[in-house]
Structures are given as C-alpha cells and as structure tokens.
Image (cartoon, grey):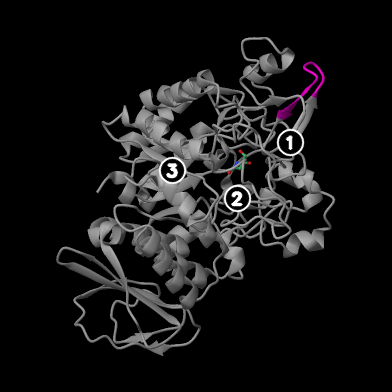
C-alpha cells in the first residue's frame, strides 16, 4: 500500500507553533527546532498551513507570491532547510496549496484590475453585471472595481479574488507552481477549498433554497442558496485528475494530494476518481461534528467502510485551524480525548491531528470583537452569547492560540512581551513538558498509539469489521491483515462494563488506563487494543 494510505498526519499552523526570534510570531526556524518532538511522537507526515508571501489578511490563505516565503516566517533558504530537515528524520512534508484565489495584493490581481486589456485581464473573474452567487462565508461575492468599471468574484472574502481557471494560462501557471515545490522535494499538497475552483461557464444563477440557511457538509450552501453552479462542477472533478497527472510526473517518491472538499460522499468520490485517479485523500469533515457515543461512531465507521472501501482510505480529522477544538465538544475531558485518540488511530483511516490536540489544548476565549480572524471581523455584529452557542467557530483565533510547550513565559512559545494571539489560560496541565513526564498523559497515549500503529501493519492497512458486543456503550472492531488480527474495544460510558471475548487473547497491545492485562472488564472510558 502506498505511503499516503498508511501514514499519520500532524498539522502545524506555523504562526502559532514556535517562535525562534522573539517577535511573537511562530516561524520556520522555530518549527525546525521542534521537528525532533514530532518525530519522537511518531507522526509520519507534517502538513503546514501556508507560509508563502502574504499580507496575512487571512493569515496566509491570501497568497501574494507562491514562490516566496513571508518574512515573518523566514526565507526560501529556511523553507528548503525545513524540507530537508523533515526528510532527514524520515518524515514526509505537505505544503498547503491555495489554488482557488490569491490575495488582492498579488501582482497578478494588481495587473488584472488595472484595465480590461492587460495581459492578466482575464486571469480573474470579471463581469459587467454580477449574478446572484453569494460568498461561502459572507453575504457578498461580487465587488465593484472602479478602474475596470466591472465586478470581480471572490467566493471567500473580498481580499481573496478567485482565479479564472477557464484561462489555460492560469491553470498552467498554478500547475507549474506545484511543480516548483515538488522539485524542491515537497511530498504533496493539502488543497484549499478544492471544490470551489472551476465555476459554471455561463455563470447561471444559483437556485434559491429556503432549507439552505446554514451550510452543511452534505449540502454546502448557506445564505438561502444552493451552490449548484458555483461548487463541485464536472470540470472541477476533471481538474482533480489533471492535477493528479502533474503530481504523478514526480513518482520517485510518489506524491500526495489531500483535498479540502465540502460535499456529501457522492461528491467526494468523484474527486477521488472511479479509477483512483483523482485526489488521493479527502478530509471527511462530517466527523468534526461527532457525538461522543459508541453508536455514533459505529454508524460512522460503517458509513465510511461502505463509501470508501479499499483501495480508498478515509481521512479522519477532529480538529483543525478552522474548527472549534475537538476537546471542547467533550467538556475538555482528557479521558474522553484519549478514547477519541484510540479510535482515530485504530480505525481504517489516515488520521490527521492538529497541533495542540495531542496535549488536549482547549479552545481559546478571545471574544469575537477582539478577533484577528477576518471571519470574526465579518461577523462582529453577532452578540457573543450567540457566538458561544454556535457549533462552528466564527472567531477562528480560538483554535489558533500559541502551542503550549511548558509553563514558562508564553507557555514556552515565545520570549516576546506580546504574542500575536494571547496564550490560552489552560497551560498548567495542558503543556508538552508536563505531559512528557506523565506516562498516562494524553500526549503519551498518542505516542504509544502511533508506535503500535507503526509496528502492527494491520492497524495501517488491515480490513475492518465491526463486532457486535451486546452492550450499546461498547464499540468493538477488528483489524485484520494476513494472519494478524487485532481487536479494539472502546467503552464510551463512565461505568465499568464486562465484555467477555470468546477468542483467546495473545497480548494486550494497548490500554488507555495502562492496564497490561485484560480480563473481560473495561473500566469507564477505557479502551484496549488486543492481539488475537
Ligand atoms: C480554508 C482554509 O482552511 C481557511 O483557513 C481559509 O480561510 C479558507 N479556506 C480560504 O482560503
């Protein structure tokens, strides 16, 4: 099985990881200093949110030069050193590729908006009369530009104009941008809002839908509009295959495309391609909104097994730089977080863990009105008590607070007097140094699980079968590869449950509460991996 189907991914938000030069902002040299930490934890791949040149209006997701590095993060030399340093440690490195839009300060857009007849005039989407499409996150997608007496389309925020992929020059330039980094050794890309890139060629109006007030994974609409013509177009599925052939030019070693795609399973499958000739992996974001129960996960696993059988591989993510931290959903309970880690690292999936998740970092408390996140600025009229009730984070600062390394100044993240976002208040027990010393910590649960994943190929690529347990609170499944069979049992309740197993157990490979034996009794919130 290819490396990207068996790997484990760690996501770094560079601005918040480690500040090596004391300016309050994380940087590439800081990350390089922490690579041994990630290696020792046992992750095999690191995905970096963007650190290219950018005015940072959306903290890097607004790129002004795809082939340069923002000075607050470092230099091109640092980026090359980072790629090499990751490789020297035997890990893979993924960059973030934002193909859909650039920053409005990108020289391409500056040129494009200057007149209707410059060489880049058609590189973005310009219309004399806008259609009814709305932005994914704000009310308006079309913005008037005096120089051209026209409107440009920005599917996300106004300072992120969408590129026009119906212009072959644009497509080739972005493909070449990918090649540029692949030549430098990058192992692939996480693809930002990949399902938005190619739009309906006639720009037909999107249908109104009363049911689509709020977007969902299955129906990524919102603002009372079905995104029939602005998302998931046939040409966009084809783009996945075209990009795949670019990536496949670099086959030694093979490279990975990991898509951020909003849509139901049928849509996601189209991006993967019938012959597995599209994107290799796609985040299954529906699980971000999990319910902490055995029945929820049993159903989800069956659903994923049904939709993504071999040779596909689901990609499981509970937290990222856009979402409320997963631990918030479970009352910041570390024991529940350990059970989730067990699930995430043992089901048939590529696990993607967001930095800080391994120590149970909680969501920040930065009020909407103080948000640096451009989304917080768009929605700053919403009263805070409503914000607190929403299932989605509209002040994404709260999941981006600095990484907590120890209990020193700024949790060891930076020596600056002021960090770009305030450090969270939960640092006494949620920090790396303290959890490294505690063999029962969440951090050590991750470490241990990543180790057993590595030495038991059945956990990486074995088939999965759900096992009936006779108790609704226990989730049980086997992972089988060749002669190797493992049984995973998770008790989602707070009480002790007896679960006798008829098959003899050869070994207890892992137990959340570190009990080396298993006599058929599972303590509350405990879970085990047993070798049969
Ligand atoms: C998705 C990214 O994850 C998010 O952080 C960003 O704001 C938007 N795409 C726009 O690029």
Could you tell whether 401 is left or right of 369 in the image? left
Mark 2 Cα-neighbour bin, 10 Å: few <14, some 14–19, many ≥20: many
Q: Do the residues labelled 1 and 3 touch (CB within 8 Å)?
A: no
* Label 3: how many Cα within 10 Å (few below 14, some 14–19, many 20+): many
**Taking 501 as reference, is 305 left or right?**
right
Q: Which mark is residue 411?
A: 2
Image: magenta residue range: 145-152
Secondary structure beneath dot 2 equals: helix
Find out whether residue 303 is within the magenta segment.
no
Distance, label 1 to label 3, CA atoms, is 31 Å
- Whether residues under marks 3 and 2 lie with C-beta atoms below 8 angstroms apart, the answer is no
In the image, taking residue 394 as reference, residue 230 lies left or right, namely left
**Residue 258 bears which disc, if any?**
3
Does the magenta run of residues contain 147? yes
Disc 1 and disc 2: Cα gap in Å? 49 Å
Where is residue 40? Give x, y as percent: 36, 50
Q: What element carries label 1?
A: loop
Place of residue 112 in the rendered image (x, y in percent of width and height, measured from the top left): 67, 16
**Quarter-wise, where is residue 447 in the image?**
bottom left
């Amino acid at each position: 099985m290819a490396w990207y189907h068996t790997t484990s991914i760690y996501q770094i938000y560079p601005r918040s990881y480690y500040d090596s030069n004391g300016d309050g902002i994380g940087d590439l040299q800081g990350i390089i200093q922490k690579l041994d930490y990630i290696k020792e934890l046992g992750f095999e791949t690191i995905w970096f949110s963007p650190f290219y040149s950018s005015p940072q209006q959306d903290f890097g997701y607004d790129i002004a030069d795809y082939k340069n590095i923002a000075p607050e993060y470092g230099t091109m030399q640092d980026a090359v050193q980072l790629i090499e340093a990751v490789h020297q440690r035997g890990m893979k490195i993924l960059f973030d590729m934002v193909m859909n839009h650039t920053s409005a300060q990108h020289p391409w857009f500056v040129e494009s908006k200057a007149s209707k007849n410059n060489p880049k005039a058609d590189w973005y989407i310009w219309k004399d009369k806008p259609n009814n499409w709305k932005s994914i996150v704000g009310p308006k997608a079309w913005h008037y530009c005096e120089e051209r007496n026209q409107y440009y389309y920005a599917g996300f925020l106004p300072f992120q104009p969408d590129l026009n992929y119906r212009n072959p020059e644009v497509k080739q330039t972005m493909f070449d941008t990918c090649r540029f980094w692949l030549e430098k050794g990058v192992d692939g890309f996480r693809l930002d809002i990949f399902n938005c890139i190619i739009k309906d060629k006639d720009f037909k109006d999107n249908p109104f839908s009363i049911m689509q007030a709020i977007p969902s994974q299955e129906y990524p609409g919102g603002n009372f509009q079905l995104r029939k013509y602005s998302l998931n177009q046939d040409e966009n599925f084809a783009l996945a295959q075209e990009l795949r052939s670019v990536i496949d030019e670099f086959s030694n070693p093979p490279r990975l495309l990991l898509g951020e795609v909003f849509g139901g399973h049928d849509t996601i499958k189209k991006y993967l391609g019938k012959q597995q000739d599209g994107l290799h992996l796609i985040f299954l974001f529906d699980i971000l909104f999990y319910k902490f129960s055995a029945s929820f996960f049993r159903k989800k696993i069956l659903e994923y097994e049904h939709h993504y059988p071999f040779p596909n591989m689901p990609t499981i993510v509970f937290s990222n730089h856009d979402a409320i931290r997963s631990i918030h959903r479970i009352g910041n309970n570390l024991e529940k977080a350990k059970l989730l880690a067990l699930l995430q690292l043992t089901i048939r999936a590529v696990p993607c863990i967001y930095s800080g998740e391994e120590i149970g970092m909680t969501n920040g408390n930065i009020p909407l009105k103080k948000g640096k996140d451009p989304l917080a600025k768009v929605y700053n009229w919403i009263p805070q008590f409503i914000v607190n009730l929403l299932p989605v984070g509209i002040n994404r600062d709260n999941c981006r607070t600095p990484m907590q390394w120890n209990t020193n100044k700024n949790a060891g993240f930076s020596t600056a007097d002021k960090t770009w976002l305030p450090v969270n208040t939960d640092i006494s027990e949620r920090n790396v140094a303290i959890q490294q010393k505690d063999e029962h910590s969440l951090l050590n649960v991750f470490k241990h699980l990543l180790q057993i994943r590595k030495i038991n190929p059945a956990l990486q690529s074995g088939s999965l079968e759900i096992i009936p347990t006779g108790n609704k609170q226990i989730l049980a499944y086997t992972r089988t590869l060749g002669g190797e069979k493992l049984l995973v049992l998770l008790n989602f309740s707070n009480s002790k449950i007896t679960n006798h197993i008829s098959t003899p157990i050869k070994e207890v490979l892992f137990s959340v509460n570190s009990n080396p034996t298993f006599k058929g009794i599972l303590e509350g919130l405990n879970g085990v991996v047993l070798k049969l």
